[in-house]
Amino acid sequence: MEVIVREINDAYESIEKGKEQGFDASVFAEEHIHSALSLVSNKGVVDGIKGLHASIKSAIAQKDIKNSLFSILEGSDVSDQDLIVNQDKLIELANAINESIDNQESFGFIVQFGVPGNQQKDTVKIVASMMDLPYVVLHREDVITTFSKECEPRVNAVFEECKALHSKQQKPVILFIEDLDGIITNIHASPSEGLKRKTVESALCKNLASLQPSDAVIVIVNTETPFALHNTLQDLQRHRIFYHSPTAEQRAACIQRLLSSYDNCLSEYAVRRLLAHSVAFSVRQLRTLFAHAYLLMLVCKYHAIPAEAVSPADVSKQQCFDAVAQFLAERAAGGCPVVPSIPDAVLLALLDKEKPSYSVVDVTRISDWCRALSRPEAEMAELEGMIKTLRERDETIRREDRANTASTEPVERRKGEAYVMKELPTAAMEAAVEKEETPRAGGLMSPKFSRMMEAEALNTSSGSDYKREMERNAREEAERVKQNEKKNLEERERMRQEEERRQHSEEERRKAEYEAQKRKEEERQRKIEEKLAAQEAERNRKIEEQRRIREEAARRRQEELERREEERRRKEQEELEQREREREALAEKRRQRMQEEIAKKERQNQKEAAEQMKRFEEERRRIYEVSMGFDAGKYKASTAQLDEQKSAEQKAREADQKKREEAVKKAREQMLEKLQREKEQKEMEKRTYQRLAELRRPAPATNEEKKQRIEAMRETVEKNRDRLKALLALKDEVKEIVAIRRKREEEERKKKEEEERKKKKEEERKRKEEEELERKKREAEEAAARKKKEEEAERRRIEAEKRKQELEKEKEEMRKKKAEKAKKMEERLLQDELMLLDCREKVILLKKMVKEIKAGK
């Protein structure tokens, strides 16, 4: 919003200058307002800007520089005295433009780089005015349109307009691209914005590459990031001009002008704080800061808010929109709003939010780019100084704030009053002030008052004195008239003599200019010949350098290929070693797991053997079932059930995926159909509005008006008939030219197609050979890998067979051991039973013997 206010004020300032100096300032006012057309989307503000733009554009007197899309300027609304910074760039830019005009060999444009907002456009205006050249200002909004399909035609149109302007005026035309960074590709842009920028960049590169010196179009671009430009834009650069940032003195001069341009009541403390905190600010940033404060004062005026109570954080966006809309309406009506004076609180609050206009990263990148191009040491030193200033900025501001002891009393300043910033107080100045003499006391000591007092004391007659005074005045008046007549005669004679001398000197000057122009033309021809020779030598040198660069690039590519191949081999070796380690670790884990399983089974067998001692028959049957088999039928049934369940789940997922795809396809078709209906609706509305606009013209009120309309329509019909005849004749000529050109183009196209076909055929043959070699190499590698894999699989199978045989042997040995243990147990049990039988028989015998003994036998 503050940019809109700044541009509107600049436009009316240009109009006031035009009235004072006698030039058509409407073209410059139109350019200022044109740059603010697409900054906001609020309807009230947009309508106000468009109405103001239309009224100012209609006031342009020169018809050949009117254009509905672009701003075409001649002359300048600023002078070299208005330049606060970069006055030394006027000569450098003028020399670059002259070299571009004189160079008839190849096209190259001029790059202005550095911190933006330091009067780059004003410099171009002044130089173009000094050289009497027309120039076209291309804003970002001129080519970045609402629809991406309109971007490329806009870029083509601006170049066609420059060529047409050159044909009309027979002068070179300057095309100034104000913000190249805003129309080229940017990774941070949204997808739609990125597409538009890519389209504009492609069209711009194509048009710049197709420009010839004979087109007489001098392109000047302004960029903040010259290191990030497209390769085509880098190659076409011929002159690079670095723009400085303002020094402390230049910032002070800018602040003085701004204080004289706005009503304000800033104290000396606020002015010194502004000067201290504006380190690393650009001129445009300072002007925008005051424009923002002026916008807040407009809000105070139109919303009845006291200027001392307003805060930038409390002002809503809608309040700003309303204030700007009323400001535009008042400006369009021919008035200038009277706003409250800008107070300290508002300006200092806005100042605290401002950031430097450049960063250390950006300046470092520009410095690296300049170093790569071997730019002058002065530029490198200045860039280093900018980085140092940024790093020391906070400390400098703190030091200046501590030293700021100026008065905080508001000082009322009106717009248009010249203001000179006071110098910082020093010890010598304070001593001088103390020694200054006190002013002398005034009194009633004037000569007139003394005569009055003397006459009153002498009491003379006032009537006689008045008569004598009148006679004396009459004699003096007659003498003065005679003296004036005599002076007028002398002045006329002097002016006549001066006019004769002037005419004589003018004639001598024309002769001298003719001789100087003749010598200059001869010198220019000699310079052109020398330049052609130098260009030829430079071309040969560049060819040699390009050959050397290509050889160096080929060598580097070969080294890179070898390095990549070595890296690939090393990675493959590392991967093989890693896989080998993984296989060894896996084998170790399997061996450990196998040992654990064997130990577990052995413990289980020991437990089973201990239980077998209690129940021999049951244990033997259970050991047999565990060691000899399992139920194969149940296993197969469970496996088949799992396969069926898995197939059902897979089928369900496929059916669900198919349903989702059909739903997405249906939604896409519905959306496309809806978009088509909306497009048709918009076309119908557009046609309806056009028809209504045609029918809106009222019928003629009188017969005289009706006759006038009929006569005007007849004249229009006659003109259109003549124009149609001319167009038909031109059409026939164009048809012949087009036929000849088409025939020539067809021959060239056939020739190119034949060459391209041969080239493609050769490339296809080479590609097939390379593919065949690559395929054979790949097949050989695959065969080797397959063979190696088969050998590895065979080795693994053999190892698995060996492990299986070892397990079978271990199982068989365990079975044998168990069988031997069972047999030994049976034998031991049998022996125990026999021993029990023997013991039972012996017990029986002993009982029998005891009975016999008892019986006395």
Image (spheres, rainbow, N blue to C red):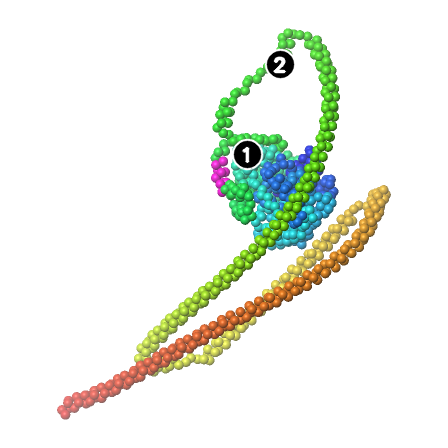
**Residue 245 image point, x, y percent:** 56, 40
Q: Is residue 779 visible?
A: yes
Within-10-Å neighbours for mark 1: few <14, some 14–19, many 20+ = many
Magenta-drawn stretch contains 394: yes
Query: Magenta segment: does it hold 472?
Result: no
Task: Quadrant for the N terminus, please.
Answer: top right
Q: Which residue is mark 1?
A: 271
Residue 155: horizontal and vertical position, in percent? 67, 50
Q: Quadrant of the C terminus?
A: bottom left
Estimate the x, y position of residue 833 in percent, counting from the top left: 26, 85
158 left or right of 657? Answer: right
Q: Residue at x 58, y 56 (%)?
A: 547
Residue range highlighted in magenta: 390-401
Q: Residue furthest left?
A: 856
Three-letter code, disc 2: Pro
Q: Secondary structure at mark 2?
A: helix
Please give left or right for residue 454 compared with residue 401 in the image: right
